[in-house]
Image (tube, coloured by chain):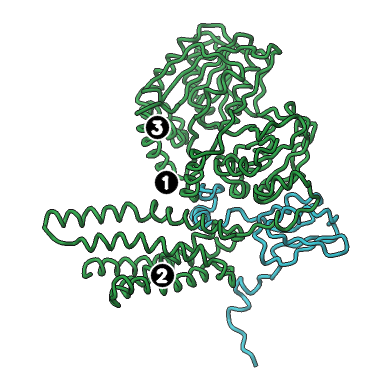
Chain colours: A cyan, B green
Amino acid sequence: MTQIKSDSCCSPSAIEIDIPRIFINIATCTGCGLCGEVCPFGLPQSNGSGKYEIKSSELCIECSACARNCPTQAIMLQEQKGCGCLWDARARKKNPSNSNGCGCC
Amino acid sequence: MAVTYMRKLEEEPSTYDTKFTTLTKGVNNKVRDWVLDRIRSSQLIFEIGCGTGALASKMALKGNDVVAIDKNINMINYAMKNYPTETDVNLLYQIGTVEDFTVEDNSKDIIVSTFMLSELKPFEQQKLLRMAWKALKPNGRFILAAEFIPSGFWKRIFKIKRWWYKKKLRRLRLKTTSVIKWFFKYLEPIGFEINNHKTWKHGSIQALELLKVDVNGNNKPGYYRPRAKKFKGIHSQIRIYRCIFTGQIDHVPIEPGLYKSGNPNRNSPIIVTANYEYTYIKVMRDLKGLDAWVLCVDSDGINVWCAARGDDFGNNQLFEAVETTNITTITDTRTLILPQLSAGGVSIPQLPKKSEGFPFKITFGPVWSKHLPQFIKEKPGRKSDKMKIAKFSLSHRIRAGITHTTFLFRKIFLLPLLALALIILGFNVLLGLNWYNKLYWIGEIFLWIIVANIIISLLFPISEFTRRFIVKGVFFGALNVIILSTLTWILHNSIIFILLNVCFYFWIAFFSTMSFSGDTMYTNPREIQGEYPIFVRINKILIIISLVFLVIGLIIY
C-alpha cells in the first residue's frame, strides 16, 4: 500500500486547487475580440463559434490588459501588481504595503 | 534645495514649522514676511496648502477674509488648535485639494500658496494656474512661493543637495516631491503676468506675485502647449543613448502635452504615448513626418509598458492629458490611438463618458511604434500578429544587455573597484611595491561583466525551456563559467587562477540573468516575486564565496 506522507493532507500546498490563472467565461463572452487585440502574447483566440478562449493560460503574465478592457467583464483573473522586474519584486517583498514598487520603471 | 525633505516633516505637524525653518535656514520666514507685505487688509483670500496655518492666521489677523485648505487632516487639526483667539477673525480651515475644492468664479482678490507647487506634476501645475485664474476677480493676484532650480554653478549644488535628501527619503520609504522645471513657461499662455519676483539663496527659493490677465478677451484662462521638440540629429541620438545606458534606474521625462508630427489638421489622427524621452523620439522618428497629433500623457518619464503596469499610464493620466491640452477643441478627430501596451493600465469601460468631458473612442494600436504608419493607413479591425505580439527580439536583448552592463558598473562595481585601484596605486607609490598586475586584474573584472552580458543577450532564447529565472540563472551561470574560464586560460594559462574566479564568473551571469527578468515582458510578476526569496539566499552565498576567493586571488596572484 502506498503510504500517505504526513504533510500531504494538512499542509497548505495539499489543499491548493489548480485553477488556471486566467479563463474566459463563455456565457458572457460576446466574441468582440478586444482581448485578442490587447494581449501582448496573443493568448485569447477565437474558438470557431464566435467566442474567445485562452489557449495556453500558463503563459499569461496577469497584466490585466484584457480583463480591464473587456466590455462584459467575462475574463476572470486576479491582477498581479508589479512589472516583473527583480528589483520591483524586492521592493514589494520588503514592504508589502508599498504600491509603487521600486519606482525605477 | 532641501525643501523636498518636508515630506518627512509633514508627519509631525507640531514640529513642522520649527524644523522647516531649520531646513530652509530661515528663508521660509522671510517668504512669509514677503507675502504678508504684499497683502493689505479687507481682501478675500484663498490659501492652498496652508499646512499649520502659520501664514493663514497672520493674514486673517491683518483683517482679511481667509479660506485655507490643506489635504493633510493632521495639519488642519493642528491649525485648528492654534486658531487665533482674537474676536472678529474671518478664517476658515478646510480639508481638501485643488482638484476637489470648488471656488466660485471671479470671487477672490488673492490666492496664496507657499511651498506646495512641488507636490504637483506638470499637468497639475497647469490645472492649478487655470483654477486660480478662474477663481480670481479681474486684476486679482496669485502669490506663490516654491523651491525652483537655480541657474549656473548653484544648479550643481542644488542637484547634489537634492540627491542627498532624496536618498534620505528613500530610506524612509517616502516619495520625493517633484522638481519644478517648466513652471514659468505656463504663466503667459494661461494668463498671468509677473508683477513682482523675489529670489532667495541664489534662486533656489523664489516667490512670485502674479497678476491675472485676460489673454483671450473671453474671460477664460488659456492653455499651454510645449514647443516642438527635436527628434532628429546628434542631440536626440545622445538622449537615446542616455536612456539606454540608464534604462533600469532613471526616469527621463519630457514636457507632457500635445506635439505635432508633420502638419496635422483638424482631421489628423491622434497618437497617444508616454512622456519618456526615448519613447517620444522613437515615436516621432517612426511616424516619418506623417501628419498626426502626438499626445504625450504625463507618465512620469517612464516608458509605456512599465508606466501602465505601475499606475503611471492609466485612465487618470489619459483624461488629465485630454483635459489639460484642450485637444477636443483643437481637432475634430474623436478617436485616440493608444499604444497596445498601455492596455495594462487603461480601461476603456471605466473611462469618463462624453458628458463628463471625454468624447473619444479608444483604439489600441500596435505594440511597437515602427508599425504606426501602417496601422494609421490600413486601420485594421484585427491587427496582424506582427503588430500585436511582443517579442524579446535580438535588438531588445542587446539594449537590455547594455543597460545591465552599465547598471552593474554604475551601481555595484565602480566605487569599490575605484577605491581598490587607488589603494593598490597608493601601495605601489608609497611602499615601492610592484603591484601593477593587480591593477590589470581590476580591469579584467570589467571585461568579465561585459562578456557575461553579451552571452546572456545573445543566447537568451536558448533558456526558453523554462520560465523559472532561477533555472535560467543557473544555466547561464554554468555557461559563463565555461566561456570565461576558457578566456582566462587563454589570457593567463593558470588553473589556480581559474579556480579562484569560478564562483565569481557564475555569480555575474546568475545575477545578470535574474535582473533580466524586468526586460523580457513575458515575466510574470507573481512568479518573480515567488522566486525572489530563493534568489536572495543563493545570491548571498555566491557573493560571500566569490568575495573570499577574489580576495585570496588578489593577495596571492
- Compare marks 3 and 2 and give the one earlier in the sequence: 3
Question: Residue B132 location, x and y as percent?
Answer: 61, 19
Are marks 3 and 1 in one subunit?
yes
Q: Secondary structure at mark 3?
A: loop
Instruction: Report helix, strand or loop for mark 2.
Output: helix
Of pointers 1 and 2, the one earlier in the residue sequence: 1
Q: Nearer the viewer, residue B12 or B417?
A: B417
Residue A78 is left or right of residue B188, and the answer is right
- Report the residue at 26% width, 69% height from top: B553
Kind of residue indicated by mark 2: Phe
Q: Nearer the viewer, mark 1 or mark 2?
A: 2
Whether B234 is drawn above or below B146: the answer is below
* Residue at the disc numbered 3: B2
Residue sitting at the far right: A49
Q: Which residue is mark 2?
A: B506
Q: What chain does mark 1 sit on?
A: B
Q: For marks 3 and 2, give the CA distance.
A: 43 Å
> Is A55 situated above or below B69?
below
**Marks 3 & 2, CB-CB < 8 Å contact:** no
Disc number lying in front (3 or 2): 2
Dividing the picture into quadrants, the one containing residue B461 is bottom right
Residue B45, located in which quarter of the rendered image?
top right
